[in-house]
Amino acid sequence: MTEQPTEDTWREMGRQFQALGENLAAAFRAAWEDENNRQQLREVQAGLEAAANRIGQAIDEAAMSPEGQRVRQEVNKAAHSAHAAGKQAWQDARPHVASALRQMIAELEKMASHMEGQGDSEM
């Protein structure tokens, strides 16, 4: 049984590729200054671009695979379920929120009346 990579594994792999890219770019910049290296660097660049294209194609193919489609459908279902649950929760809470707001307004009106009454007696 093969273990599925976790989200952290993918994230770490992304960081490693980013670091590799940064290191390669620094090496290329240093090597580019030497005229003799420029042609060889162009060949390396072409090879890296081809590799990047193949990786992109593999990712696209995986996303379009039956497994990729199933994952996409599951994510969409989860998003729709979460949206429906949120909407239902709001519908359930709405009368309580409205009641609490009415109560708060009534209390604020009492406080304002009380404060106005105190202001008149202080003059």
Image: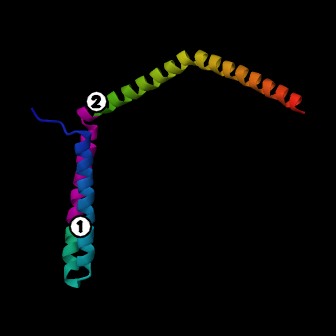
* Residue 83 sits inside the magenta stretch: no
Q: Does the residue at mark 1 contact the one at mark 2 (Cβ under 8 Å)?
A: no
Task: Tell me the kind of residue under disc 1.
Answer: Leu
Residue drawn where x is 21% and y is 73% of the image: 41
Q: Is residue 28 above or below residue 9?
A: below
Towards the viewer: 2 or 55:
2
Dot 1 alpha-carbon crowd within 10 angstroms: few under 14, some 14 to 19, many 20 or more:
few
- Identified at 83% across, 28% down, the residue is 118
Residue type of the residue flagged with mark 2? Arg
On the picture, is 114 further left or further right than 8?
right
Q: Residues within 10 Å of mark 2 (few under 14, many from 20)?
A: few
Farthest residue to the front: give it. Answer: 122
The kind of secondary structure the magenta stretch mainly shows is helix
**Residue 43: x and y, percent?**
20, 71
Residue matched to label 1: 24
Numbered disc 2: secondary structure:
helix
Report how many numbered discs are placed on residues in the image.
Answer: 2
Q: What is the x, y in percent for residue 72?
A: 32, 33
Residue 82 lies in quadrant = top left
| Above or below for 6 versus 55 | above
Q: Nearer the viewer, residue 119 or 6?
A: 119
Q: Earlier in the sequence, mark 1 or mark 2?
A: 1
Percent of width and height locating residue 69: 29, 33
Stretch of the chain drawn in magenta: 45-68
List the residue tagged with mark 2: 70
